Image (spheres, rainbow, N blue to C red):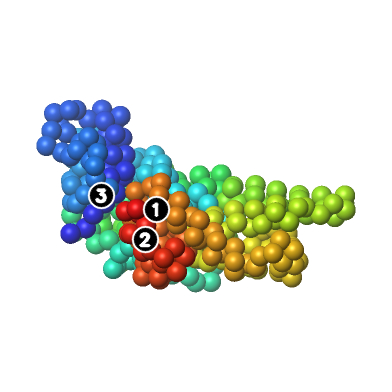
C-alpha cells in the first residue's frame, strides 16, 4: 500500500477549508487531528480528498493548492531543498531520496542538450492521482521560484491524463506550453535555468568570497577555526545531495583545492576528517532530537543506502542507530 506525508494531507485539507469547503462536505474524511500521532497514511485517502475538493470548489483547486504549498510540507525532502546550491539540485535530491526510501522512483531525471526533463512516475489510475500530479508539478514550479527568488518558469509541461480544468488555468499556473494525453508526466526546464544559483547559495558564496578579498587586501589570514567552521557548514548543506568533493567546497569558498587542503592541515584536520565528523554530528543530533526514521537520516547525511549508514554509525559509536536512539 502506498503512503503519503501527513503534512501534505494537512496542507490540502486546510487549503480546501480556506477556499470555503463546508464541514458537511468534509464529513467522513480524515481530519488533521486524526493524524496527530501518524507520520504517514494511505495515499488513496489523500487522492479522495483531492477529488472531493475538485468537485466542491472552483475549477483549478489542484493547481492553486500546489502553488500555495510550503516547502516544509514536503517533510525531510522539502527541508533539504532549502540548502540546495542550484535550482536543479532539488531533482537530484528527489532522485536520492526516493532511491533510499522507496523501491520505485517517483521522480526520474532525463538530461539532454539544452534541456532537463523531470518525469513523475505515478500512474493516473483515478482522478485524485491526476489532480495530485498537477499539484505536484505546480508545487515544484513554486519551490524553484522560492529557493532562487527568481521568476524561473518551465519550458513545457506534459500530463498523461486528459485536460481537467479550463486551459487558461494551466497556462496561468505554469506560464508555458501545457500538453495533455501525452505518454508521460513531464516537467521540462532549460538547463541554463536549472543551473541558477539558489538565493541561499548566492548569499553564502558572496560571504566566503568577501572573506578572501579581505584576506588579500588586508593581509590578515582568517583564523583556521573559522575556515573549519565554514567547511563544516557547507558540508551540512551539501550532504543530502551526497558527499561533496573538495573541489566543490573550495570553489564555494573562493580557494583552490591546494589552498583549502593547506588551511585545513594548519588546523590539524583533513577534508575526509571533516566529512566523517559532520556526518556523525548530524546523525547523532537527528537521532536524539527528531523522530525522523533511519532511512531519512541516511539521506540527510549523504549515504546512498541505509545499510551503509548503519555500518558507519556503528563504527562511530559502537551502537546501531536503533540502539543509540533507544538509549
Say whether residue 152 is visible. no
Q: Are marks 1 and 2 in contact (CB under 8 Å)?
A: yes
Numbered circle sitting on residue 142: none
Of callouts 2 and 3, which one flags the residue occurring earlier in the amino acid sequence? 3
Tell which of 222 and 169 is nearer to you.
Answer: 222
Q: Quadrant of residue 51?
A: top left
Residue at mark 1 to residue at mark 3: CA–CA distance: 19 Å
Residue beneath the point at 44% across and 63% down: 317
Element at badge 3?
strand
Residue 29 percent coordinates (x, y): 15, 38
CB under 8 Å between callouts 2 and 3?
no
C-alpha distance separating marks 2 and 3: 21 Å
Q: Residue at x 37, y 57 (%)?
A: 324
Which residue was labeled with disc 2?
321
Q: In front: mark 1 or mark 3?
A: 1
Q: Which residue is mark 3?
A: 40
Q: Is 206 on the left-hand or right-hand side of 162?
A: right
Amino acid at each position: 500500500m502506498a503512503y503519503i506525508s501527513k503534512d501534505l494531507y494537512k496542507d490540502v485539507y486546510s487549503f480546501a477549508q480556506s477556499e470555503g469547503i463546508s464541514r458537511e462536505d468534509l464529513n467522513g474524511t480524515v481530519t488533521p487531528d486524526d493524524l496527530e500521532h501518524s507520520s504517514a497514511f494511505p495515499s488513496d485517502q489523500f487522492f479522495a480528498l483531492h477529488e472531493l475538493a475538485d468537485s466542491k470548489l472552483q475549477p483549478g483547486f489542484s493547481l492553486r493548492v500546489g502553488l500555495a504549498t510550503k516547502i516544509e510540507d514536503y517533510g525531510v525532502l522539502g527541508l533539504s531543498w532549502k540548502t540546495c546550491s542550484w535550482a536543479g539540485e532539488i531533482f537530484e535530491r528527489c532522485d536520492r531520496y526516493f532511491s533510499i526510501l522507496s523501491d520505485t522512483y517517483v521522480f526520474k531525471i532525463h538530461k539532454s542538450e539544452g534541456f532537463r526533463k523531470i518525469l513523475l512516475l505515478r500512474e493516473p489510475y483515478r482522478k485524485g492521482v491526476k489532480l495530485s500530479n498537477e499539484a505536484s508539478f505546480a508545487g515544484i514550479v513554486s519551490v524553484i521560484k522560492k529557493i532562487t527568488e527568481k521568476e524561473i518558469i518551465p519550458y513545457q509541461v506534459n500530463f498523461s491524463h486528459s485536460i481537467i480544468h479550463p486551459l487558461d488555468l494551466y497556462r496561468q499556473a505554469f506560464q508555458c506550453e501545457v500538453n495533455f494525453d501525452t505518454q508521460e508526466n513531464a516537467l521540462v526546464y532549460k538547463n541554463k535555468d536549472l543551473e541558477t544559483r539558489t538565493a541561499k547559495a548566492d548569499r553564502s558564496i558572496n560571504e566566503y568570497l568577501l572573506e578572501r578579498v579581505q584576506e588579500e587586501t588586508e593581509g590578515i589570514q582568517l583564523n583556521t577555526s573559522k575556515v573549519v567552521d565554514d567547511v563544516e557548514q557547507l558540508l551540512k548543506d551539501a550532504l543530502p545531495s551526497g558527499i561533496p568533493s573538495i573541489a566543490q567546497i573550495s570553489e564555494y569558498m573562493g580557494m583552490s583545492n591546494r589552498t583549502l587542503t593547506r588551511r585545513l592541515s594548519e588546523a590539524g584536520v583533513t577534508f575526509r576528517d571533516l566529512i566523517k565528523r559532520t556526518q556523525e554530528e548530524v546523525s547523532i543530533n537527528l537521532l536524539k532530537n527528531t523522530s525522523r526514521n533511519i532511512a531519512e537520516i541516511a539521506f540527510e547525511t549523504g549515504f546512498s543506502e541505509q545499510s551503509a549508514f548503519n555500518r558507519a554509525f556503528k563504527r562511530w559509536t559502537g551502537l546501531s542507530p536503533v540502539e543509540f536512539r533507544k538509549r
